[in-house]
Image (tube, grey):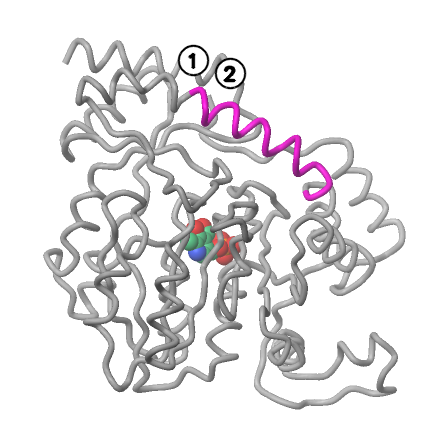
Amino acid sequence: MIFSQPNIGELEKKYVLDALERKMLSGDREYTHRVYKEFERRFGIKNMLLTVSGTAALEMAGLLIDLKEGDEVIAPSFTFSSTINSFLLRGAKVKFCDIRKDTYNIDENLIEQLITDRTKAIYCVDYAGVPCDIDRINEIADRHGLFVIEDAAQAVGSTYKGKYCGTLTEFGCYSFHETKNYVMGEGGAIILNEEKYLERAEIIREKGTNRANLLRGIVDKYTWHDIGSSYLPSDVLAAILLAQTERFDELTRIRMEIYDFYQEAFREAEEKGWLRRPVVPGYATHNAHMYNILMPDDNTRTWLSDELKKDSIPAYICYVPLHSSPMGRRLGYKAEDCPVTEEYGNRLLRLPLSSCLTMQEAEMTVQKIYELLKNR
Ligand SMILES: Cc1ncc(COP(=O)(O)O)c(C=O)c1O
């Protein structure tokens, strides 16, 4: 059984071949613009720029808010390294914030006590495609004059109070890495929810030049305007993403069916106190990006994943908390600084889920877990 794999069909192949035949190899060509149209039509998203990765989108956000040495950023430790690297690279410091016990997202009740006169931004992460309580976070940020960057790498298609993740703060960042719901191999996007950032974002993304205006025919030569990097992806990759976006309903339905199956199947195990199922707050819808079970302790989690492996059922830990990782420790953090992250990070187990997983495989996974837990 394969834990997660991208669902690549005939449409992806057709578009990629077309992009190759028409020699649309560099970025910002027809397929990139068709992706933008599709995101606007489906999600009402405007001012989106495709990037070479979710990591690059986060780095662009750090550049756009002019983070510099001495600035502080509040962010969860229960995330991928890219969230934090994106602002450490700008010389800013991280102030790790603990997470909520229900969603495993940043605990908005703990943010305010971390704010100092050096704080410049709050980075929130929609873990497993379940949105943070963004209204509360935006309200805190407004009161203190801070930026909010939404790392919605895992949350494409999820909603918060009826609005799509990625559109809820000044900057939303998506990932289209092959492990995500909708893929382009390596890729991502930044969404500029305030139009005033668009022009500079285009420049930063194109090595600090105004090449985007040359492509639009607004200028007849382009030149260096700002710092920047090479953040735009090839149109060949955008061709894959266009197909995935056009297949959005189909790909989402497959994931949802598996997620709902797990959710129903583990009801009894939860009632018996063997595990806890994922929690999606009433303010949100999720995109079935991951299915996690919370085990009673670290030992049970490790034992269960080892036993499943013996039957070729892959189940993995989620994130190793960053504050207690080797790098986190180098930054001066100790495990006890974010106790909920530390504990829950050690108890969560991620089950196989992708748009290539079959229902038989999901059934086999559930059956084996019940067998193991009953006999423990
Ligand atoms: C929360 C989060 N942020 C950022 C990233 C980085 O995205 P990418 O792999 O596209 O650079 C990931 C990817 O796994 C992620 O899960």
Left or right: residue 373 versus residue 219 is left
Magenta part mainly helix, strand or loop?
helix
Identify the residue shown where x is 51% and y is 16%. Answer: 359
Identify the residue shown where x is 15% and y is 70%. Answer: 332
Instruction: State which region is magenta.
Output: 245-261
Left or right: residue 205 versus residue 271 is right
Label 2 crowd bin: few (<14), some (14–19), many (20+), radius 10 Å: few
Badge 2 amino acid: Met
Left or right: residue 283 versus residue 202 is left
Q: Position of residue 94 (x, y in %)?
A: 28, 71
Looking at the rendered image, the quarter that the C terminus falls into is top left
Badge 1 amino acid: Glu
Residue 259 on the magenta span: yes
Identify the residue shown where x is 21% and y is 72%. Answer: 114
Asked whether mark 2 and ligand 1 are closer than 8 Å, the reply comes as: no
Q: Which residue is mark 2?
A: 359
C-beta proximity under 8 Å, tags 1 and 2: yes
Q: Which residue is mark 1?
A: 363
